[in-house]
Image (tube, coloured by chain):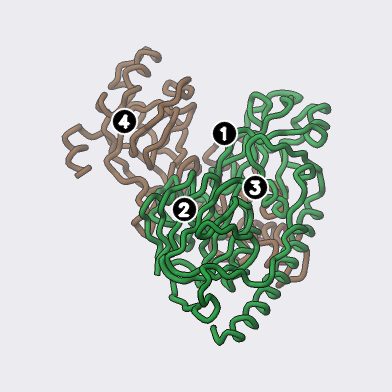
Chain colours: A brown, B green
Amino acid sequence: MRNTTFSITPLGDNAIMIEWEQRISPVIHAQVMQAFLHLQSLQQPYITDLMPAYASLAVRYNAVRIRQEIKRPARAWITAFVTRALQEAGAATAAAVPGRHLEIPVCYHPSLGPDLANLAQQKGLSEEAIITLHTAPTYTVYMLGFLPGFPYMGTVDPQLATPRLKQPRTQVPAGSVGIAGEQTGIYPLPSPGGWNIIGQTPLRIFDAGRPDPCYCRPGDQVRFVPISLEAFTKQLS
Amino acid sequence: MNLRVLQPGLLDTVQDAGRHGYQHLGINPGGAMDRIGMYVANSLVGNDPAEAVIELHFPAAAFLLEAPAMIALSGADLGAMINDQPVPINRPLVVSGQSVLRFTRPVTGACCYLAIRHGLLISPWLGSYSTCLPAGAGGFRGRALQKNDVLPFKQAASYGAVLRQLQVAELPWTAGTGELYSAADRIRITEGSGFALLNAHARQQLTTATFAIAPQSDRMGFRLQGPALRTEHRQELLSAGVSQGTIQLLPNGQLIVLMADHQTTGGYPRVGHVITADQPALAQLRPRQELRFAMITADAAEELLWQQEQRLLFLQNACKLRLEEWLSHYGLH
């Protein structure tokens, strides 16, 4: 946590919120990830959940067990514990922790990306240009939310940034790749949704039957690789 | 040796204390909306307080208990009948095989918990029996109960000596749950980070106005109908982790309280948090019922949770003692 400042505030009576400077930036997110991974590695039994996001990390704890076993007010105890842990993490590791590199195949065929044509028209770009712009960067998975395993990735080329649909769809197929604001994401499950859908991946982004049900994790580095409809159909089966 | 669904209800799901440790993957905690109801129902039949229970909303399912069983109902009173005989909540019941349990009217509360002694034979998913509806996993096949679903009991039991010719025997004690639930006109909250964004009038309104539970409320969140709360100035927030009980301010000035199946992150201002000790009372409110908030400190909230847990522990121990005494009297175990 070198040269970084964070604040800790209560999030109700069984969680605290660690916040860094509130903006979307890979540098800030790297600090979030460093804190998240360090706290995760400590396997502190009183911490029941860690929720990293763009510039924050929520820490949920078992207040009753802390009171029972440590016999001290839980919030004060956990705040001190987390503060100390973050200082240690900063001292131990200067560099940001690299995430896994994932390549995710996406088919940008109009049948799978119903908003691709609209987006191209809106932005005065060809569909090929949209695909090129979308597949060029390596995206950071800033957080998972909305649905189990839904990765919020960013940030897209400014030319692609576009608000959510005014009228959300009642059903978006699993694997759909979309854009909302500066973010790009993948629907892990069929769901209603308002993201602009430009393609679909044949990968199972969520599968309850796997030991690791979610394909993406916070901090992953993701690149989209365009594939043909034939390749999509083949990989799906 | 099964619980069979004769007729499905509105939303009957298997729940426990929730699935923790997976919120960084966007997997919501779930669990019983009213943890006291789950705790008491399980305690009455001698189960671990977090054993899998069935959470029922009105109209609730009708069940066939194929084999003799000891059951308990807690939380909401939905006018339960066993073989057309009314039975009370908060009391252990011994029921003969081939009995029909059904629910006739919403008397008090919104969610009723059905616990069966020794529990139901269900496989956990990610360490919990709770039904995760968005993932289609956990609980019974990842979904709400449907007609002809069959949930096996973990253990068979014989209560012939108790029942003799009876179809239902009520055990002679009741769990007093009154003081475990706070009153609806005083649901206590703590300040959230978004409280400071409210203008002076709205900050007052939060704890003086009356809010009603909107009909489109569900296990994900309770939408409240009340005065539109205004902010001092607009501020776009980055999405961040949220928690059960978090009160979010929607752009139209209305509030939504996140409940058990809440999404793991949210981007609306968090004006407050319903304290854990009062979440059960909130969960038991039905659409159109009214509530008021009272602001307390985070330290006071923790103290109230601690006191509530001590009462629950006391109740659990008392239930255990009565049950052991009763079982040994009949030569059961």
Q: Could you tell me how far apart the alpha carbons at marks 4 and 2 are, in whole angstroms?
A: 45 Å
Screen quadrant of the C terminus of chain A: top left
- For residue A199, the mark is 4
Q: Is residue B319 visible?
A: yes
| Residue linked to disc 2 | B62
Q: Residue at x 42, y 32 (%)?
A: A192
- For residue B288, the mark is none
Dot 2 and dot 1 residues touching (CB under 8 Å): no
Instruction: Name the amino acid, label 3.
Output: Val
The location of residue B38, given as percent across then percent down, is: 60, 60
| Residue linked to disc 1 | B216
Instruction: Name the amino acid, label 1.
Output: Gln
* Residues tagged by mark 3 and mark 2 found on one chain of the structure: yes
Q: Nearer the viewer, mark 4 or mark 2?
A: 2
The local crowd at label 2, few if under 14, some if 14 to 19, many if 20 or more residues have their Cα within 10 Å, is many
Q: Residue at x 42, y 70 (%)?
A: B67
The local crowd at label 3, few if under 14, some if 14 to 19, many if 20 or more residues have their Cα within 10 Å, is few
Q: Could you tell me how far apart the alpha carbons at marks 2 and 1 are, in whole angstroms?
A: 24 Å
Relative to the observer, which residue lies in front, B307 or B283? B283
Q: Could you tell me how far apart the alpha carbons at marks 1 and 3 are, in whole angstroms?
A: 21 Å
* Image quadrant where residue A194 sits: top left
The location of residue A108, given as percent across then percent down, is: 27, 29
Relative to the observer, which residue lies in front, A14 or B163? B163
Among numbered discs 2 and 1, the one appearing first in the sequence = 2
Dot 3 and dot 2 residues touching (CB under 8 Å): no
Asked which secondary structure carries label 3, the reply is: loop
The location of residue A229, given as percent across then percent down, is: 19, 32
